[in-house]
Amino acid sequence: MISVNVLYRHTDATKFNMNYYLDTHIPLVRKLLGAALKGVVVHQGIAGGAPGSPPEFTVIAELRFDSMDSFQAAFAPHAPAVTGDIVNFTNVEPTIQFSDVRLG
Amino acid sequence: MISVNVLYRHTDATKFNMNYYLDTHIPLVRKLLGAALKGVVVHQGIAGGAPGSPPEFTVIAELRFDSMDSFQAAFAPHAPAVTGDIVNFTNVEPTIQFSDVRLG
């Protein structure tokens, strides 16, 4: 199982419409990627590790797929629609990485 | 449900003993935090979003708890043991944040 980690950094300039993200963007991603998408987790940052500090990321999301191949096959045809929707809810360019899910 | 997100940044200088982390550190955390710890997910970074780029994080972990209060009650007595074990598997000081689990 692999995950696509999508992290939206928090700064003073960060704008992020959580309602649009949860109610429109994630459903769009689910619809376009179909059965290849095995799960979605969304963490909304509330605080940093040090007392009184802000979180480093406004959102940390993970999308799970059976393999890199299954991700690429599902995502490639819809990449413009998925990435093009990002400006509709945030001014942050997300940090993206691919990971092996070692636990959980 | 809240999550504690623990992110170990990847650089050329990063050392990270994944076997120790999975086989010793995570079991230690589970043992010390007990039933308050509702779940652990470990993502091991394999690639960045741009073709040929490295992942920004060697590891992205999440630990779930019912609430901030239940985390703090479980963690506070064992904070020195948990954080003191980090030098046994990495030279990276993790980025930590607290999040609301909005989905998943």
Image (cartoon, coloured by chain):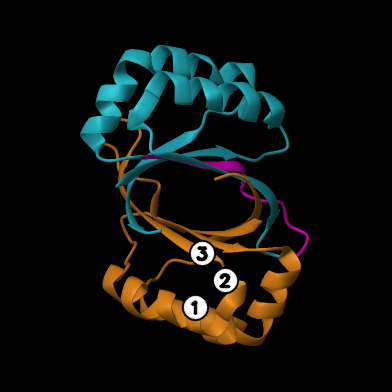
Chain colours: A cyan, B orange
Cα separation between marks 1 and 3: 11 Å
Residue that protrudes farthest toward the right in the picture: A52
The relative height of residue B29 versus residue A83 in the rendered view (above or below) is: below
Could you tell me if the residues under marks 1 and 3 are in contact, i.e. CB atoms within 8 Å? no
**Amino acid, disc 1:** Val
Quarter of the image with the C terminus of chain A in it: bottom left
Q: Chain of mark 3?
A: B
The answer for how far apart the CA atoms under marks 2 and 3 are is 6 Å
Say which element carries label 3: strand
In the rendered image, the vertical position of residue A29 relative to residue B20, given as above or below:
above
Q: Which residue is mark 2?
A: B37
Disc assigned to residue B39: 3
Q: Are marks 1 and 2 in contact (CB under 8 Å)?
A: yes
Badge 3 amino acid: Gly
The residues colored magenta run: A51-64
| Contact between labelled residues 3 and 2, with CB atoms less than 8 Å apart | yes
**Marks 1 & 2 on one chain:** yes
Q: How many marks?
A: 3
Q: Nearer the viewer, mark 1 or mark 3?
A: 3
Of mark 1 and mark 2, the one earlier in the sequence is 1
**Would you name the residue on which mark 1 appears?**
B29
Residue B58's quadrant in the figure? bottom left
